[in-house]
Image (cartoon, rainbow, N blue to C red):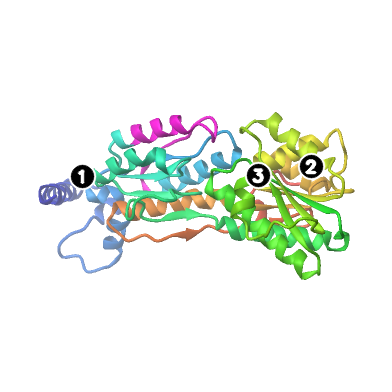
Amino acid sequence: MKKKVLSALLSVAMVATLLVGCGGSKEEAAAPAPEATTEAPAEEEAAAPEATGEALHFEIVSKGLQHEYWQAVKNGCESKAQELGATINFVGPASESDIQPQVDMLNAAVEANPTAIGLAALSTEACMDAIIEAQSQNIPIVGFDSGVPGAPEGAILANAATDNYNAGVMAAVEVFNLIKDKLAAGAVIGVMCQDATGESLINRGLGFIDKMAELVAAEGLTVTVQGNDKYVSDSKVEVTEGADVTLEVKVPASVDNTASANDATALLQTPGIIAIYGSNEFSANNLVTADGNIGKLGKEVVGAGFDSGETIIAAVRDGRLAGAITQAPVAMGEKLIEMLYAAANGETVADVDTGCQWYNAENIDNPEICQNLYGYTAAE
C-alpha cells in the first residue's frame, strides 16, 4: 500500500510539472501544489477517482434483467458512475428464479477483482461461497433492492433499498380507503405475489396483509388469511374459521406469466372479491392481462399494483388500476454507486431507504412522481 501511495504521489508531481510546461487547462493546472492555500483544489482531488492513481470499477449483480425495473436501476448506476469517473459491469440472470446463473455471475464478479461489488441476492445461501471469497480478497460488498439477508456479519457493509414492508403498508392504507364501504361478511381481498422466496417481495406482501387485517379489524369485522403457506405463517393475522373477511394470497408455482395470470383469473372470479393487490410489476401486469377477458377491474374490483412499466401506467390512467406504489429505481442505482464509491475509498456506509410513493390517475404526471416511473410517457 505504501508503495502505491508513493507511486501515486510521484505520478501527480510529474503530471503537474508537465502541465506547467505544456500550458494545460485550468482544471489540470489546479492539480495540488505544495504551496497551494485555497481549498477548492483539495476538494477536486478528493472527488476525482483518478487523483488516487487507481481506476474504480464496480461489479453489480442484480436479481434479473427481465423487468423494466432493473433497467431503471441500471440507468441510475450508469449515470452516477459516469459522474464519478468509475466504470461498472451491471449483470443479472434472465429470470428471478435463476439462482445458479446468478451465482455464476457473482463468482465471475469476484474473479474480476473489482474495487467493490453491488449485490441483490436471489439466495444468500447459494451466494455464500462467493461472498466469503470476496471477503478474503477485501472486496467491499454493498447490497441493493432486497440486499443479502442473512449474510455473515460484516460481509455486507450496507443496503440501498425501499423499505418494502412499509411500502406494503402504504398500499394497504390506500386500498382500504377505496374499499371501506364495501367491507362486509363474505368479502375477499386478493394478494398476488411473484414468489415466496425473495425477501423484498415477501415483505411487500406481509406489509399489505398485516396492515389490511388491522384496518379491517378496526371496523369491527373478523379477518383471516389463507393461500400460500409462507405468507400465511409469517403474517401477524390469526387464521380464523368463518371470519367475515378473507385475505387470499396467490403465488404461482414458477415465475411464469401464464401461471400468474391464471391466479389472477381465479381471484377475479372468486365470489365476494372486492380488491386485488399485485405486489410487483410481474404480478400487477398479469392481473391487468387476466382482466382483459373479464372486465371487473375499476368496476366491481379495486385493483392496485406495485412498480410501473407501460402496462401498469396505462391501467392506472384508464382506471382499471386505482393506483400503484412506485419505488425510486433510478435513485436506488445512483445511491448504490455513491455507497460503492464511498466504501472503495474507505469511508463508512450505512443503510439507505430509497423511498416509495402511491400514484394514481390524478398525480401520475406530477414531476415528483413520474420521474420514478419507468415506461412513463406524458399524457397527450
Amino acid type of disc 3? Asn
Judge the density around disc 3: few (<14), some (14-19), many (≥20) Cα neighbours within 10 Å. some
Quarter of the image where the C terminus is located: top right
Instruction: Decide if residue 310 is on the left or right side of residue 338.
Output: right
Cβ–Cβ under 8 Å for marks 3 and 1: no
Marked residue nearer the N-terminal end (2 or 1): 1
Determine the CA span between mark 3 and mark 1. 71 Å
Q: Which numbered disc covers residue 257?
A: none
| Residue highlighted by disc 2 | 267
Q: Residue 18: image x %, image y %? A: 17, 45
Judge the density around disc 2: few (<14), some (14-19), many (≥20) Cα neighbours within 10 Å. many
Secondary structure at numbered mark 2: helix
Q: Quadrant of residue 289?
A: top right
Q: Is residue 251 above or below residue 326?
A: above
Q: Which numbered disc covers residue 228?
A: 3
Amino acid type of disc 1? Cys
Determine the CA span between mark 3 and mark 2. 14 Å
| Residue highlighted by disc 1 | 22
Q: Specify the segment rendered in magenta.
A: 84-109
Amino acid type of disc 2? Leu
Question: Residue at position x 57%, y 59% from top?
Answer: 355
Q: Quadrant of residue 101?
A: top left
